[in-house]
Image (cartoon, rainbow, N blue to C red):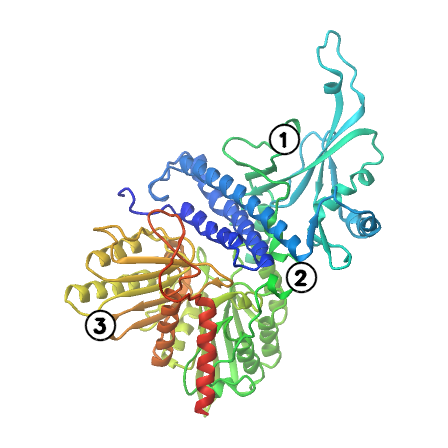
């Protein structure tokens, strides 16, 4: 492995999260949206420590160097580097938060702490505390316990120190000063997650006041501890993050649902991997807690600000005028596909592409609702990865089974951090008589596909869709994703083969159209890249354009390097992790990479291979990561409809032309914004205009 051949995956991910932090710092982004980006930054970091940092720590504790799997860096060195970067990013995030809160004052929005409560606000706060907060508090006095109770993963706690009035009797000849000898009581108060973090106080004229739940509790410390005789009390926030890897029980007598349920419960007991504390906490309190919790040097110990769990800022209340938030865009209809009519009738004639959130997710729900009611529909097969809390998808499937359809659902119980929700849905769907499949041992099912069989003129016809995203009404409003609706019998026959594989794991089908992981995606992509290499060497038109969330598979990166050396020009849009190093002479000078972080989360995967001027275009559920190639079931679907091919290429080029929210990925890893002399183009806004124009053109034809 040559030096500078790859960017380490974890360090690249931290640079992605730095781009999220850039959005929070961007003064052109509305203020409340900037707060929400701070929340996303914090939430991302929590998940990173639970999963990636925890994995590296496991490698280190196993006594392995890890250089081969970590891109040429040792595990212990990487742990130190991560902590150093995160401390710097946390410090930056605190400065950004202060700046935003000061700016909110210009809009008459004031975030106050417990020392800034005005007299007219006291009665409201007292009532709110007594009615809602006090009954929900869990308060633990630590002095009386032999060992600390297990702190919940990512829950926030107030670490309270009470200095009691009566001093401890001094030992003879003791040189301890009286104020040092006073008894101290240490207490933990868990911040309730059942109550909104931001408490909106009654308006005072034009002024809007907010107090964080933490400060509301601080304001009422005396009410909580009034049975104690203390002379001073302090409260500082702490948070612990635990290893979130699931260890699945191998007991054959248990159902898969039982195993996942128990494994999720065990996650609560996972080893600590990060300890974050208020940097102003008293040293004796800090040492007491770390000793009690068994925190050591291999853990990431991060001094932070007064408030943790800043992920809660994702749900900051919508206050103030329209200028403080992004203007909502109404999702557009798909040209030629009317929600009020029969979708099957139109899809029988041609394929349609849905691009959320620019176009309405209602098409997916309508497609399944129509299938549930249509007497000619005999069966529905669908994969589910992450459902919304209130899912119209799930209710449509239940409706279908009640109408006598045979419904088969492959539900992925191990969708990280959605295990509990998916278990709940699995049990509900099973009770309704739906045939549930729990995937393939050792593989996650990440593909998004649906096949519906419909009896037409005594012949069974298939309709369906293949998607890049989750069937989730909530995320469809903020994630950009692609869904192909098709009646192409050859493609849907192959999607059906994927469902056969779920049920009979030892049977591996051959595919002429789809690229399916874990058997054929890697070899299929290598073949497609090789074709571009051969074409470039023969002087024929060649090129590769990719839109991905992550690119970290070393062998595929090596193949792209080979293509670059052969003269294949490549444009890569990679939102998150990018282990490929672009622009290096003799290795990757023909590869350019950008990342776009903006209002919506960029989530589609698009592969475009020039193929001598007759492009091969795919949409896919798979990023170019080892897990997606070898350890997950994924579907990459070719686009045969020339109009949809053109649309995908045009939308890719709109994104590539972004010079407002695009950052250049380079060996410098500095997240430099792409700037040029062309008119400003913000791709997400331009894409909405693109689809609006398509709609207007369609209306003119009519």
The residue that mark 3 highlights is: 612
* Image coordinates for residue 439, horizontal then vertical, percent: 48, 62
Q: Is disc 1 in contact with disc 2, using a CB cutoff of under 8 Å?
A: no
Which secondary structure lies at badge 3? helix
Q: Which mark is residue 320?
A: 2
Q: Residue furthest top?
A: 173
Q: CA distance from mark 3 to mark 1?
A: 65 Å
Q: Which mark is residue 519?
A: none
Between circles 3 and 2, the one closer to the viewer is 2
Circle 3 crowding by C-alpha within 10 Å: few under 14, some 14–19, many from 20: some
Q: CA distance from mark 1 to mark 2?
A: 39 Å
Q: Where 3 falls versus 519 (above or below)?
A: above
Q: Where 212 falls versus 360 (above or below)?
A: above
* Image coordinates for residue 77, horizontal then vertical, percent: 40, 35
Front residue (pair 106, 306)? 106
Q: Where 425 falls versus 220 (above or below)?
A: below
Q: CA distance from mark 3 to mark 2?
A: 54 Å
Q: Where 500 falls versus 142 (above or below)?
A: below
Q: Earlier in the sequence, mark 3 or mark 1?
A: 1
* Image coordinates for residue 390, horizontal then vertical, percent: 63, 67
Which secondary structure lies at badge 1? helix
Circle 1 crowding by C-alpha within 10 Å: few under 14, some 14–19, many from 20: some
The residue that mark 1 highlights is: 286
Q: Quadrant of the N terminus?
A: top left
Tell me where residue 621 sits by quadrant.
bottom left
């Amino acid at each position: 492995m040559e030096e500078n051949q790859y960017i380490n995956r974890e360090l690249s991910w931290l640079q992605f999260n730095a781009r999220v932090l850039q959005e929070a710092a961007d003064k052109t982004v509305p203020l409340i949206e900037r707060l929400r980006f701070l929340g996303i930054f914090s939430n991302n970091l929590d998940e990173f420590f639970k999963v990636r940092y925890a994995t590296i720590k496991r490698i280190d504790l196993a006594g392995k160097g890890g250089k081969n799997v970590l891109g040429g860096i040792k595990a212990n060195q990487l742990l130190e580097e991560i902590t150093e970067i995160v401390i710097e990013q946390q410090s930056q995030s605190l400065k950004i938060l202060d700046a935003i809160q000061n700016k909110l004052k210009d809009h008459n929005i004031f975030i106050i702490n417990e020392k800034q409560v005005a007299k007219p606000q006291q009665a409201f706060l007292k009532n709110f505390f007594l009615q809602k907060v006090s009954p929900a508090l869990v308060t633990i006095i630590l002095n009386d316990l032999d060992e600390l109770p297990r702190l919940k993963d990512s829950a926030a706690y107030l670490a309270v120190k009470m200095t009691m009035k009566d001093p401890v009797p001094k030992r003879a000849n003791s040189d301890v000063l009286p104020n040092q000898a006073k008894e101290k009581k240490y207490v933990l108060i868990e911040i309730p997650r059942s109550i909104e973090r931001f408490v909106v106080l009654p308006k005072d004229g034009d002024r809007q006041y907010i107090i964080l739940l933490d400060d509301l509790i601080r304001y009422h410390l005396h009410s909580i501890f009034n049975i104690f005789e203390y002379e001073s009390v302090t409260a500082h926030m702490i948070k612990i993050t635990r290893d979130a890897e699931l260890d699945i029980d191998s007991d054959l007598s248990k159902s898969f649902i039982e195993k996942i349920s128990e494994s999720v419960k065990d996650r609560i007991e996972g080893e600590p991997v990060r300890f974050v504390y208020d940097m102003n906490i008293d040293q004796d309190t800090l040492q007491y807690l770390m000793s009690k919790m068994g925190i050591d040097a291999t853990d990431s110990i991060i001094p932070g600000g007064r408030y943790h769990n800043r992920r809660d800022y994702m749900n900051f209340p919508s206050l103030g005028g329209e200028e403080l938030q992004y203007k909502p865009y109404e999702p557009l209809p798909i040209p030629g596909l009317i929600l009020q009519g029969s979708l099957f009738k139109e899809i029988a004639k041609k394929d349609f592409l849905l691009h959320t959130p620019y176009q309405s997710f209602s098409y997916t729900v309508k497609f399944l609702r129509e299938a549930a009611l249509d007497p000619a529909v005999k069966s529905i097969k669908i994969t589910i990865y992450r459902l919304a809390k209130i899912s119209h998808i799930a209710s449509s499937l239940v409706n279908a089974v009640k109408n006598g359809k045979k419904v088969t659902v492959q539900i992925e119980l191990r969708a990280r951090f959605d295990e509990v929700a998916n278990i709940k849905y699995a049990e509900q769907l099973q009770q309704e008589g739906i045939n549930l499949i729990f995937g393939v041992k050792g593989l996650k099912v990440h593909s998004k596909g649906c096949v519906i069989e419909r009896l037409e003129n005594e012949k069974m016809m298939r309709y369906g869709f293949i998607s890049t995203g989750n069937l989730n009404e909530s995320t469809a409003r903020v994630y950009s994703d692609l869904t192909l609706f098709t009646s192409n019998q050859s493609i849907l026959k192959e999607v059906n083969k994927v469902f056969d594989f779920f049920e009979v794991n030892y049977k591996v089908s051959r595919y002429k159209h789809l690229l399916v992981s874990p058997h054929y995606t890697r070899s299929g992509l290598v073949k497609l890249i090789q074709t571009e290499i051969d074409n470039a060497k023969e002087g024929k038109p060649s090129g590769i354009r990719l839109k991905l969330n992550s690119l970290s598979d070393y062998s595929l990166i090596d193949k792209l390097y080979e293509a670059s050396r052969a003269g294949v020009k490549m444009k890569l849009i990679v939102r998150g992790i990018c282990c490929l190093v672009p622009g290096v002479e003799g290795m990757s000078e023909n590869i350019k990479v950008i990342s776009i972080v903006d209002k919506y989360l960029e989530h589609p995967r698009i592969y475009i291979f020039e193929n001598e001027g007759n492009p091969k275009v795919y949409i896919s559920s798979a990023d170019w990561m080892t897990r997606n190639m070898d350890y997950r079931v994924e579907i990459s679907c070719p686009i045969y409809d020339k109009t949809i091919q053109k649309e995908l290429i045009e939308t890719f080029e709109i994104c590539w032309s972004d010079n407002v929210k695009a950052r250049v990925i380079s060996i410098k890893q500095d997240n430099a914004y792409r700037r040029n002399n062309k008119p400003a183009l913000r791709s997400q806004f331009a894409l909405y205009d693109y689809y609006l124009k398509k709609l207007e053109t369609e209306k003119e034809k009519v």
